[in-house]
Image (tube, rainbow, N blue to C red):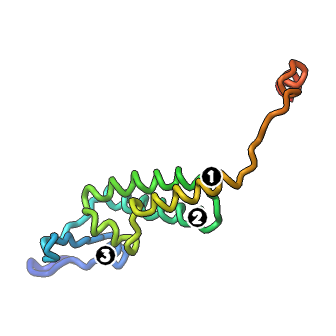
Amino acid sequence: MFLQPDQEPAITPQAALKKVIYVIITEDNQLQKDKELTPPQEASVDIYKASQKAYNNALQHKKYQILADLWKNCMNSYLTVRKFLGHPNTCKLLNGWDPLMEKKNIMLLTEEWRKKQPTTTKASSNNSPNSQKQQFQR
C-alpha cells in the first residue's frame, strides 16, 4: 500500500500513546510551545512517578525507617525531570505533589518513629571471647 504525497501515514493506538506531549507554559500562563519528550526523558518521568508511588506506599504502611531514603530517590528524580519540564509541569505530573514540601513531613515522621523505637543495648556478656566465637561458627 502506497501513500499519496498529501496523505499522512496511519498511526496505531499504541504509537499514539507513546507520543507524550507536554505543554510548556510560561510564567504568564501563555502557551509557549509543545515539546515532545525523547525516550530517555519519558523513562525519567516514569521513574519519577514510580519513586513517588513507592514513597506513598511506605508512608501508607508506616515504614518510617525507609521513608527518608525513598524521599531522596524522589527528590533526585524530581530534579532530573524538572530540568526539562520546569517546576510547574513537574508538579502537575503527580497532581501537585512536590517533594520539596514533603520534606517537613518526613522529618517529623522519622523523628517520632525514632522516639518510639526501643533503644537496644548490648549486654557485656556479648563482648566475651566465647560469644564471639559462637557468632563466627554460625
Q: Is residue 4 above or below residue 86?
A: below
The answer to which image quadrant residue 120 occupies is: top right
Cα–Cα span, label 1 and label 3: 41 Å
- Is there a contact, CB below 8 Å, between mark 1 and mark 2? no
1 or 2: tag closer to the N-terminus: 2
> Mark 2 highlights which residue?
59
3 or 2: tag closer to the N-terminus: 3
In the figure, is residue 88 to the left or right of 123?
left
Q: Residue at x 28, y 77 (%)?
A: 11
The answer to which image quadrant residue 10 occupies is: bottom left
- Amino acid residing under circle 1: Gln
Q: Residue at x 12, y 80 (%)?
A: 4
The circle on residue 16 is 3
Along the line of sight, the residue nearer the viewer: 40 or 29: 29
**SS at mark 2 in the image:** helix
Q: Residue at x 20, y 67 (%)?
A: 35
Q: In this view, which residue lies farthest toward the left?
A: 5
- Amino acid residing under circle 3: Ala
In the figure, is residue 14 to the left or right of 67?
left
**SS at mark 1 in the image:** loop
In the figure, is residue 122 to the left or right of 49?
right
Q: Which of labels 3 and 2 is toward the front?
A: 2
The circle on residue 47 is none
Q: Residues within 10 Å of mark 3 (few under 14, many from 20)?
A: few
Q: Residue at x 56, y 55 (%)?
A: 67
| Quadrant location of the N terminus in the rendered image | bottom left
Cα–Cα span, label 1 and label 2: 10 Å
Q: Please state the horizontal and vertical placement of residue 33, each as a whole percent of the image.
A: 14, 71
> Mark 1 highlights which residue?
65
Q: Please state the horizontal and vertical placement of residue 41, each as a whole percent of the image.
A: 31, 58
Number of marks present in the image shown: 3
